[in-house]
Amino acid sequence: MSGMTDTLMMPRNYAIIENDEMEYLEGGSWLTYKNAAALSQLSVIAGHVFKHAVATTALSAAAAVGAAAGATGVGLVVAVASALGTAFALSLTAVQTIFFGMAIGFYNSDRAFDHWGTSVWTWSATVGVRKASG
């Protein structure tokens, strides 16, 4: 078989990902949403706010149960881990709420906004909202 090589040839526009090969990534660019598409995206951002608020509530409850279970052993571990998770989820809920408010403001003035979101597996969040560029 003449002419065959053992060299792996990649397409010109391939991207190298420095993560596990089975990790699922989505997002990475600003998208403009106008009119009905903007309303649909507003519901997605509202879903992010709700999802992170529910996580905050669940982690707060777990922290309370862990603290009530005792100040040592597994109860302490659960309480500390849940308290740290609560702080993170509460911060994320606040940020998502701010982005939701910004998106509503841009929609009300221009009927459009730019959005940058990200997700890994089932976790997703809005990471940016700005005035529509297009």
Image (cartoon, grey):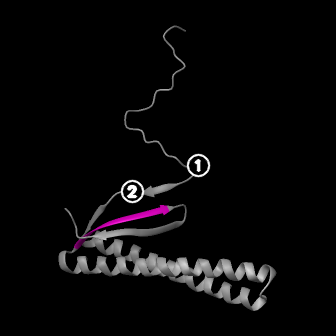
**Residue 64 — which label?**
none
Element type at mark 2: loop
- Magenta-span inclusion, residue 114: yes
Q: Which residues are magenta?
A: 112-119
Report x, y in % for residue 33: 28, 67
Tell me the quarter of the image containing the N terminus.
top right
Q: Residue at x 37, y 37 (%)?
A: 13
Mark sitting earlier along the chain (1/2) = 1
In the rendering, at what x and y percent does residue 104 appear?
A: 29, 80
Residue 120: image location, x then y, percent: 52, 61
- Number of numbered discs on residues: 2
Q: Main secondary structure of the magenta part?
A: strand
Q: CA distance from mark 1 to mark 2?
A: 18 Å
Q: Indicate left or right for 104 with 50 as reference.
A: left
Q: Which mark is residue 28?
A: 2
Q: Residue at x 49, y 55 (%)?
A: 25
